[in-house]
Amino acid sequence: MKVKIKKWTGVAVWKWTANDDSCGICRMPFEACCPDCRIPGDDCPLVWGQCSHPFHIHCIMKWLSSQQMAAAQLCPMCRQGWRFR
Amino acid sequence: MENMAQPRRNVTSEDIVSAHESERESLLDGGDDDDFFLKGPAPNPIPLAGATKLSQVKLQVEEVTNVMRENVSKLFERGDRLEELQGTIPKNMHRLKAACECLGFHFDLSWMDEGGTSKRTESVILNEEEALQILKSFNFEEAILNEFMEDVSMKLHNTVIPKFWKLLELQEASEPFAVFCDAVHELSSSLRGVLARVPLMERLRPEKWTKCGQTTVLGLLKLHLKTELKSQRPLHYKNLLIQFYSRAFKIFHHRREIGVNQELKVLGLLECLVGDVLTSIVHETIQNHVQATCKGSFDVSHVDGLEKWLRKVVLDWFTIILGNPGDTFLETLEARLLQFLFETYTHTRMEQLFTIVIEFPESQPALEDLKECLEKTNLRTQLIQSLKAALQTRLLHPGVNTADILTAYISAIKALRVLDPSGVMLELACGPVREYLKTREDTVKRIVLCLTDEYYGDLTEELGKVDGSGGTRAAGGTQGNKGSHEPMEVRVGDWQHWMPDPWDAAPPSIQSLLPASENPSDVYKNRSADIVSMLIGIYETKDKFVTEYRTILANRILRLLSFESKKETRYLELLKLRFGESLLHNCEVMLKDVADSKRINAFIHGLKEYGMPEFPSYPVESMIVSDQFWPTIREEKLELPASVKEHLDIYTKAFEMLKGNRTLHWKTQLGIVHMDLELEGGRTINLMGKGLIREVNGDKFILVEDGYREEKPNLSLTTTSEDDDEANGYMASASDQHQEKLQVYWTYIMGMLTNIESLTLEKMHSMLRMFTLQGPQLEECTQAELREFLDQKVRNHELMFVNGSYRLVKKG
């Protein structure tokens, strides 16, 4: 007996390829969205800093805009200067 | 003479006077006595004393003489009169007697004749008029009337009535119809003579005459008749009458029987003798007719027909029996019978109400009938109670599955709306149903299934129906219950048609009356809510429904894997109107995942020229799921063949290319495989991978799903079997999740058993409780749950159950 597969329809869960589970700012899992968003994934993507720390883009933008001086924009995790990777 | 009557008496002034007289008499009589003053005192007092005594006797004699004289004169006087009288008596007596005889009374007047003063003249023939005159002139009316009544009573008591009952009783076994007729004829004819004399008596009757509350002789006579009749009636006389009139009703155009009724009516007996029999027969007839008419047919309105029947058949019959009793009488009778008809109808329908409710859309006419009748009768409470009881006994027990209870409840909502638009009746009758549904575990699931799947009922339509009115609701805001003020506003605008709640409505809760309350119109809302709201209202919170819907939706998507979200999106939109958007956010993301997956699949397959990798032998599609928003997917380890893995990896790579920084984790136990099975015979069968295939020695196979079997049923091995039931779908069910929690205990149990070797269930439970108190992460679990968990471990050969205690399976 031979089995010939014609089509495979599977189920998969998508994940961010990050070395952490949840956003350090909103404490939500990366696969969820930030508190201001409703749809995860493309609508609420992650960004990585030079320091390799990822955050929800909306979270980090909010954080950065709350910092008074552009020079003092630091990563909330490691206190290094924040720069998008 | 007076003195003689009173022998002993005191001296009175009269005596003194009379004494003076007698003294004077004696003085006058004593002629020889000289004047006292001239002669001086009498020389001898003794002769004086003797003279006094004599005069006394003389006086008494005198007195007697006087009285006698008087008496004699009186006697003479009377004698004259008596003579006169003796002349007249015989003449008058004769006239009186003649008068009496003329009226049919025979008094014994012979004592008059014995007096013999005058000869009996030849009998005087008088006409009635004269006789009446004579009797009146003698003030004899009363006596004659009394005599008449006495006479009649005796006759009734001794002959007529006993005969009547005897006639009835004797022939009880034979033809009742004839018996009754004969008896009545007999009664009537024996009373004919008496009745004939009544008009004369009537004329004899004085102007203001009352006896036993009757003012006419006829009335009195009838009263006597009734009394006698009733006092002598036998025990079972009713049977006969019932038989008679039942038959009479069947052939009520029968002439002879009318005669009987007429005779009874003349005697004034109709009412008293057969009144209650008639009533009971008519009632029975109505009951039978109503029951026969209403039996099992709910789709036709019967009230009008029944009313017509009553007027035409029953009332006509009454008219015939009662002769022409007058319009007012008939009107009251009709009203009474109609009332009875309505009550009977309501009672009949009440018994069937459960069935009526279940068959709702078809039974609408019956319900409208019932509504009409309820307005006329006072049976509302009884109706509610009876329906409540029927629901309790026929629906609310473990033998009925939840779906059926729900269907019945939905029917009840619809049906009772017809009966009572205010919804109070529904609230009262279906309270227990709601309470009971709350205790069923799968209620929520059933409701959600009903709401979102045409297969399970017509509620999807219902969900859609609210679209119009509900649309404005949700437009107000994301909060679903914000729109609940709306019914109140409608009420305010519609105040002219406002009706107070029925009396049996539950009072509005205090909370809803407080102005600060969030939903002042909660009570109204609940009563006038549509079916879906009623169902959702069974539970206090909407969360349960949303959670359940999420699970059902997830199962549905993963089962079909069709990437078609249109239908579900529509339901989701409708549900959002109900539950509010925020609660259904997860589901929204889930449906978006479906749409996204479809797009990604198209991308990966359609854009090969843009560097997408090719699948070597078959295409792979995937449902890409946002894990955080889906219910927990049951974890199951399934190692896929290497070639399949390869294909999946290609897909993953493509995805990673498409979406930077993201990757896929495959749920290998889920999915659909399209494949061909090539068998030795050269036949190729196209199968869905999910199908249950059982292979039988060599090239024979059995497709279990279709129930198809080859002749040789010696099954050697089972290749695949998968749980296809949606109820036990791919999502981790609540009990599974609980099992996971229990898994936490497992390490504790292992530790305990390693140290102590074997433990009973009770001991283990109490020890675990001790740990639970210390560690907040452990949830309380009951002994039963623990036992279940441990038994499962025993089945998995991780534990042994020996002599009532558990122990670890020794390795090796």
Image: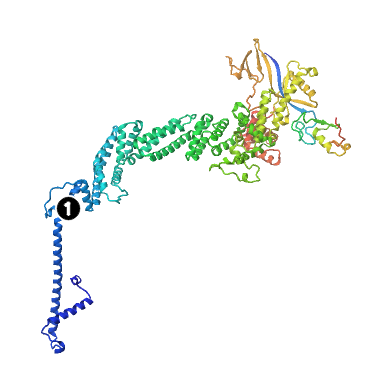
Asked which quadrant contains residue B696, the reply is top right
Q: Which residue is mark 1?
A: B92
Of residue B256 and residue B236, the one placed in the foreground of this image is: B256
Within 10 Å of the Cα at label 1, are there few (<14), some (14-19), or many (20+) other Cα atoms?
Answer: few
Quadrant showing the N terminus of chain B? bottom left
Q: Is residue B35 left or right of residue B693?
A: left
Asked which quadrant contains residue B403, the reply is top right
Residue drawn at x 36%, y 31% is B250
Residue B484 coordinates in the image, percent (x, y): 64, 38
Total labels drawn: 1
Of residue B746 and residue B233, the one placed in the foreground of this image is: B233
Of residue B312 and residue B228, the one placed in the foreground of this image is: B312
Q: Is residue B94 above or below residue B704?
A: below
Residue B363 visible at all: yes
Indicate the amino acid at tag 1: Asn
The residue furthest top is: B682
Q: Label 1: state its secondary structure.
A: helix
Residue B58 coordinates in the image, percent (x, y): 13, 76
| Chain containing the residue with disc 1 | B
Q: Is residue A8 left or right of residue B319?
A: right
Residue B472 coordinates in the image, percent (x, y): 66, 35
Quadrant showing the C terminus of chain B? top right
Residue B619 coordinates in the image, percent (x, y): 73, 18
Q: Is residue B521 left or right of residue B649?
A: left
Residue B666 visible at all: no
Residue drawn at x 51%, y 37% is B389
Q: Is residue B13 above or below residue B160?
A: below
